Image (cartoon, rainbow, N blue to C red):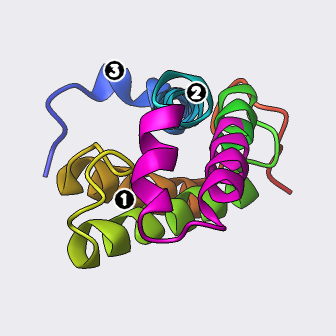
């Protein structure tokens, strides 16, 4: 089948770049939200279920998501960061399906976390794309 816009095929290296930066911004925003914006409400909600792990898990999770976002934005260790992103998305989907009462800790929709999972899996397969420190061997 013929391509409708064959002149645009030279831009195909930019597709992983756009996915990588978008996913990085999403993780950076979620990490910022956990660490600063909604921290007290999330800790209060998690303390009712896991009192000893609430504060530590929010700090660890927020830092992990922020670092994952930074690595994805700058294109450093992209496939490793995408694996971490996929695991975070799987964990969030698990929480959305089995812990429905944690609405403040998992405030985004299931579709949001499914999209994060799909983009992460795509970056694991395709690599970093343009403007990254990762180079294909």
Foreground disc of the pair 3, 2: 2
Q: Magenta stretch containing residue 40, yes or no? A: yes
| Residue bearing mark 1 | 118
Label 3 vs 2, first from the N-terminus: 3
Report x, y in % for residue 6: 28, 28
The image shows residue 34, relative to residue 92, as above or below, that is: above
Quarter assignment of residue 101: bottom left
Label 2 vs 1, first from the N-terminus: 2
Dominant SS of magenta comes to helix
For the record, the magenta segment spans 39-66
Do tag 3 and tag 2 residues touch (Cβ < 8 Å)?
Answer: no
Residue closest to the eye, 73 or 100: 100
Q: Please, what secondary structure does the residue beneath circle 3 have?
A: helix
What mark, if any, has residue 32 been given in the picture? 2
Residue closest to the eye, 125 or 94: 94
| Residue bearing mark 3 | 7
Residue in the image at 48% along x and 63% along y = 121
| Quadrant of image for the C terminus | bottom right
Residue in the image at 75% along x and 27% along y = 74
Report x, y in % for residue 32: 58, 27
Find the distance from the CA under tag 2 to the CA under tag 1: 22 Å
Residue in the image at 39% along x and 49% along y = 105
Q: Magenta stretch containing residue 92, yes or no? A: no
Looking at this rendering, what residue extends furthest in the bottom direction?
Answer: 98
Q: Please, what secondary structure does the residue beneath circle 1 have?
A: helix
Report x, y in % for residue 35: 62, 32
């Amino acid at each position: 089948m013929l391509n409708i816009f064959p002149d645009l095929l030279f831009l195909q290296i930019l597709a992983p770049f756009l996915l990588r930066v978008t996913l990085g911004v999403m993780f950076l925003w979620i990490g910022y939200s956990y660490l600063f914006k909604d921290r007290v409400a999330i800790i209060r909600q998690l303390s009712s279920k896991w009192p000893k792990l609430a504060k530590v898990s929010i700090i660890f999770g927020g830092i992990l998501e922020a670092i994952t976002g930074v690595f994805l934005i700058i294109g450093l260790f992209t496939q490793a960061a995408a694996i971490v992103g996929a695991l975070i998305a799987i964990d969030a989907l698990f929480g959305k399906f089995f812990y429905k009462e944690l609405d403040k800790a998992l405030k985004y929709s299931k579709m949001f976390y499914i999209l994060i999972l799909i983009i992460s899996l795509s970056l694991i397969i395709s690599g970093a794309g343009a403007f990254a420190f990762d180079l294909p061997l």
